[in-house]
Amino acid sequence: MSAEKRRRVVLKIGGSVLDDPATRVRFAANVAQGMTELDLDVVIIHGGGAQLTRHQERLGLEVKRNDRGLRITDPETALAAVQVLGGEVNAALVSALAKASVRSIGLTCADANLASARVLDPALGAVGEIVAVDASVLEDLAAARFVPVIATVAPDEADALGTSFLNVNADAAVAPIAGAWGADAVLFLSDVASVLDGDQPVLTLDAAGAARLEARGVLKGGMIPKVEAALSAAAALPGTLVKIASGNATQALVAALGSGAGTSFIAPNPIVTASEVAHGS
């Protein structure tokens, strides 16, 4: 099958899955299985919050988060993020993939001018949001059957010297990168198998349903930005499969791309004007 016809899948994998060597190996095996059985092109975007927190603690840096679970990042923590996410976590994942016979290339958002960012909120410090993506490097690597493995530390567009980096929440980086690449499926693989309402899995979720769950206290902490990111990906790629699903299970990738696993996110319906209806648009 040609590169143009292979299904493009973006996997966002959390640091909680990558933190344990056994689950990291299992994830790599799942990627190998999915690429072979389903003939996929894969891009991996990873977090590493637990690893970054430990590194902050080793350095004596205070770990701070806001009430929505986002890390407050001072300049020292921003440097630590480059070291840990772009170094330790990325290299360990690339190594695990290599042992599973998956050829991968570790990237930060600075590599090949993949993405730049701006400060999201001054109250969060050096936390960024992606403002521009050049997906050509993803196209080139996928065409050569390499898997790009992206650590979401990005150059600050306001820094003309290119020496300042922003820590971009990996969940929030998914929509702009997946949209620029034209992904056919976006999977947020985590240590939870789905969004839960009590002990019941939520099979489908839209923005209104997510707001109701948050109002009831069902969505809280780090799950809030994850759900918001999934909704953003669904909105950026209408008609694309977007899920939160398990990253720990055997055959997790194949299962998540099928029916019955995880929580699927529904894009908002486009607003159709009376003029468009009259003209059949």
Image (cartoon, helix red, strand yellow):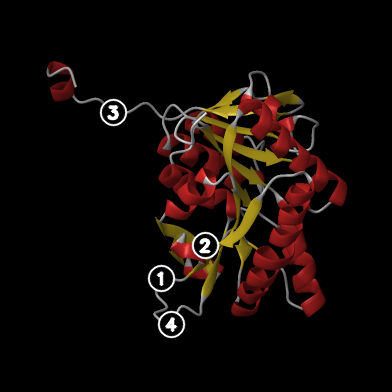
Label 4 and label 3: CA atoms lie apart by: 42 Å
> Which numbered disc covers residue 271?
3
Would you say 102 lies left or right of 70 here? Answer: right
Residue at the (39%, 80%) spot, across then down: 160
- State the residue position of label 2: 109
Secondary structure of the residue carrying tag 2 is loop
Q: Position of residue 92 (x, y in %)?
A: 76, 58
Amino acid type, label 4? Leu
Label 4 and label 2: CA atoms lie apart by: 16 Å
Secondary structure of the residue carrying tag 1 is loop
Label 1 and label 3: CA atoms lie apart by: 33 Å
Return the disc, 1 or 2, that comes first in the chain's sequence: 2
Q: Depth-wise, is mark 1 or mark 3 nearer the camera?
A: 1
- State the residue position of label 4: 161
Would you say 167 lies left or right of 181 here? Answer: right
Secondary structure of the residue carrying tag 4 is loop
Q: Depth-wise, is mark 4 or mark 3 nearer the camera?
A: 4
Amino acid type, label 2? Cys
Amino acid type, label 3? Ile
Residue at the (46%, 71%) spot, across then down: 156
Label 1 and label 4: CA atoms lie apart by: 10 Å
Q: Position of residue 146 (x, y in %)?
A: 60, 48
Return the disc, 2 or 3, that comes first in the chain's sequence: 2
